[in-house]
Amino acid sequence: METMRLVVSGTVGAGKSTFVRTFSQTAVVDTERKATDDTALMKRKTTVAFDFGTRMLGRDIELQVYGTPGQSRFDFMWDLLIRRAHAYILLVAANRSSSFNDAREIMTFMNQRVQIPMIIGLTCMDLPGALGHEHVLFGLGFMNDKVRPPIVTVNPNDKTSVFEALMVLMAHQIFQRSHGKSPLGNVEATTPLTSPTSRTAYQWPKRQLS
C-alpha cells in the first residue's frame, strides 16, 4: 500500500484544523489548547503541535494529512512535519490582508527546507473584505505568472471543497514528479517525491488497525 503525506499549513485562523477534521475518515489526532496570547482575540483554542487525519483512496493509497500550528513560535513543528511531506497546501484567509506577510514567511520557511509541490488555498472568501486571487498572490510576493503555484478557493467546512483542493494538490504533485520539476520552477528536484527523507528522529504516528 502506498502512503501519501500532505501538509496543511497557514496562519492562525485560516482553517487548518477544520480542514483536517472535514477530510479525515478516522478519528482526528489534534493538539488544540486554550489560546493564551493575542490568538485568543481570534479563536478560543489553537493548535500547538499538529492535527492528523487519514483517508483511504481505494484499497491501495492511504492519504495522511497533517495540519501545522499557525504561530511562528511553534515553527519547530513546521520543520518536523514538512520534511516528510510529499506536498503541501498553504491556507490563506482572504479577508485578512494583515496576515499575508505571515503566510509569506511560512511559505519561505517551508521552501527553504524542502522542494516539494505546493498550492495556495484561499479561505474566508465569503466574508467581508475578502480579496481575489490576484490580490492575494501579489500580497504573497508572486509577481511572475510563470512561477505562481496553483491557487484554489477552499471552504474548510465543506467536504466537497476540501476534497477538490486535495485533488488539485495531488494532481500538481503527480505533474511535478512526472516532469522532474521543482515547485519553484528554477531548480531541479533533488529528492524523490515518493520517498522523502527525514533529517530528524521524529516518529510519525502509526495508524492503529483493529
Image: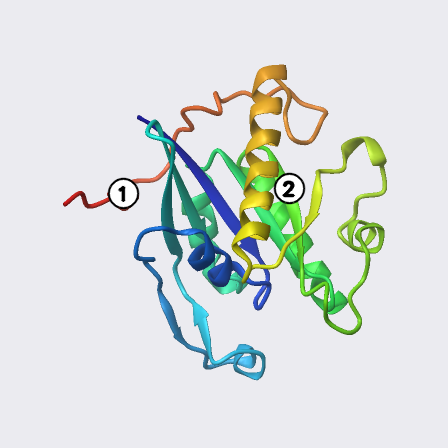
Residue at 62% x, 31% y is: 172
Q: Quadrant of the N terminus?
A: top left
Q: Which residue is mark 2?
A: 119
Quadrant of residue 32 within the rendered picture? bottom left
Residue at 67% x, 23% y is: 187
Residue at 61% x, 23% y is: 176
Q: CA distance from mark 2 to mark 1?
A: 26 Å
Tell whether 60 sits left or right of 179: left
> Count the marks: how many?
2
Residue 139's disc number: none
* Kind of residue at badge 2: Ile
Question: Would you place residue 59 above or below residue 155 in this image?
Answer: above
Quadrant of residue 116 within the rendered picture? top right
- Front residue of 114/128: it is 128
- Nearer the N terminus, badge 2 or badge 1? 2
- Label 2 vs label 1, nearer the camera: 2
- Front residue of 45/77: it is 45
Quadrant of residue 110 within the rendered picture? top right
Location of residue 61 in the rendering, given as x and y in whole percent from the top left corner: 37, 30
> Crowdedness of circle 1 by 10 Å Cα count: few (<14), some, many (20+)?
few
Tell whether 196 sits left or right of 173: left
- Front residue of 71/85: it is 85
Confirm whether residue 167 shows in the render. Answer: yes
Location of residue 52 in the rendering, given as x and y in whole percent from the top left corner: 37, 52
User: In what element is the residue under mark 2?
Assistant: strand
Q: Which residue is mark 1?
A: 203
Q: Quadrant of the C terminus?
A: top left
Residue at 52% x, 59% y is: 16
User: In what element is the residue under mark 1?
Assistant: loop
* Kind of residue at badge 1: Gln
Location of residue 180 in the rendering, given as x and y in whole percent from the top left corner: 61, 16
